[in-house]
């Protein structure tokens, strides 16, 4: 488990750097067009910044998968959330991006909330990869419905000014959907090929859609608000999946329960604080 958590921390740092590189690449690429996904993908791939970021993202994903195979998903995602501060440091020191005080507070608050949630979890051993098919299908289906609802909201003219925020949330949900599916695959011993094949296809589809939504969000919004929000949503959703799908235990003590409720409140407050005060870029 300790090795898995160490890998999760490494994945967080590599993933944040990859996202910052992709954000820089998106700023110099042609506008992403929903009706021309292949054309948009080729234009993004032509950007050295985006290509370098995508390459690092693949490494981060492989390290993340290794971490999920060794440790419970809730602990892995909490370790990933703890890397949120490195996002702000790298954005400011390496790329010269301005990080607002409220965004520093949001990243610290969200990371602390998720860490507090894990610290109040009773001690347990193993990777906790066991699950029931009904539980994982229900949870994944719920995430898919939420993402579909947000896509409908994104098309609303009233929300056009915050389209990049909605895209970041959609990307985070899709990343969570893929992450839960991958965690399930690590514990899906003895599953027939009739179940395994669509499962792998679902994982790939969610991953591709997540990458596309993330690129669109990165092109339209600032680095901290988009990357931070995507990570927060993805980590929080997967921590919930750890409890509901994979049976990661919750505290049974009243004080522990109160602290866990406080932790979720901190995460929600963080999500409200991450978006920058400045006016977003015009919708593409």
Image (cartoon, rainbow, N blue to C red):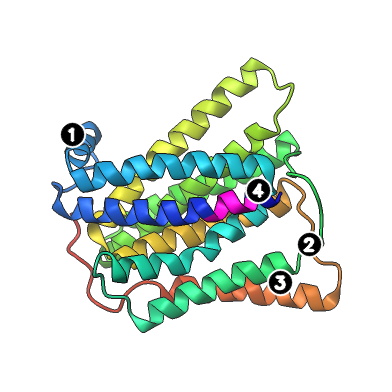
**Visible in this render: residue 268?**
no
Instruction: Tell me the CA gap for discs 2 and 3.
Output: 9 Å
Work out whether mark 1 precedes mark 4 in sequence or the reverse, and give the earlier one.
4
Instruction: Tell me the CA gap for discs 1 and 4.
Output: 40 Å
**Where is mark 2, residue-wise?**
250
The residue at the far bottom in this view is: 101
**Where is mark 1, residue-wise?**
39
**Where is mark 4, residue-wise?**
3
Tag in front: 1 or 4: 4
**Residue 124 relative to residue 42: left or right:** right
Instruction: Tell me the residue at 66%/71% (across/down).
Output: 116
Instruction: Tell me the CA gap for discs 4 and 2.
Output: 23 Å
Residue range (magenta): 5-9
**Where is mark 3, residue-wise?**
260
Residue nearer the viewer, 185 or 152: 185
Residue nearer the viewer, 72 or 249: 72
Residue 281: which disc?
none
**Residue 104 relative to residue 258: left or right:** left
Overall secondary structure of the magenta section = helix
Task: Give the class, few, some or many, for how many residues have Cα within 10 Å of label 1's Cα (few <14, many ≥20).
Answer: some
Instruction: Please identify the quarter of the rendering in which residue 210 is found.
Output: top left
Task: Indicate yes or no whether the magenta region holds residue 245.
Answer: no
């Amino acid at each position: 488990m300790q090795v898995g958590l160490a890998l999760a921390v490494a994945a967080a740092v590599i993933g944040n750097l990859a996202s910052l590189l992709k954000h820089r690449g998106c700023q110099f690429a042609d506008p992403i067009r929903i009706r021309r996904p292949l054309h948009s993908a080729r234009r993004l791939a032509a950007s050295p910044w985006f290509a370098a970021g995508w390459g690092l993202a693949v490494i981060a994903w492989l390290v993340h998968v290794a971490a999920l195979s060794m440790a419970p998903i809730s602990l892995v995602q909490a370790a990933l959330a703890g890397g949120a501060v490195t996002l702000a440091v790298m954005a400011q020191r390496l790329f010269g991006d301005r990080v607002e005080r409220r965004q520093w507070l949001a990243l610290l608050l969200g990371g602390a909330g998720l860490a507090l949630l894990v610290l109040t979890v009773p001690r347990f051993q193993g990777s906790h990869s066991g699950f029931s098919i009904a539980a994982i299908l229900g949870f994944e289906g719920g995430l898919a419905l939420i993402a579909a609802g947000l896509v409908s909201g994104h098309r609303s003219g009233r929300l056009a000014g915050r389209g990049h925020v909605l895209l970041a949330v959609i990307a985070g949900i899709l990343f969570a959907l893929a992450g839960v599916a991958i965690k399930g695959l690590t514990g899906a011993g003895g599953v027939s090929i009739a179940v395994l094949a669509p499962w792998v296809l679902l994982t790939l589809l969610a991953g591709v859609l997540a990458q596309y939504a993330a690129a669109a969000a990165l092109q339209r919004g600032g680095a901290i608000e988009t990357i931070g929000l995507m990570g927060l949503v993805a980590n929080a959703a997967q921590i919930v999946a750890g409890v509901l799908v994979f049976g990661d235990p919750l505290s049974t003590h009243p004080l522990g329960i109160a602290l866990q409720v406080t932790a979720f409140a901190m995460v929600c407050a963080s999500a409200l604080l991450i978006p920058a005060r400045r006016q977003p870029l015009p919708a593409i």
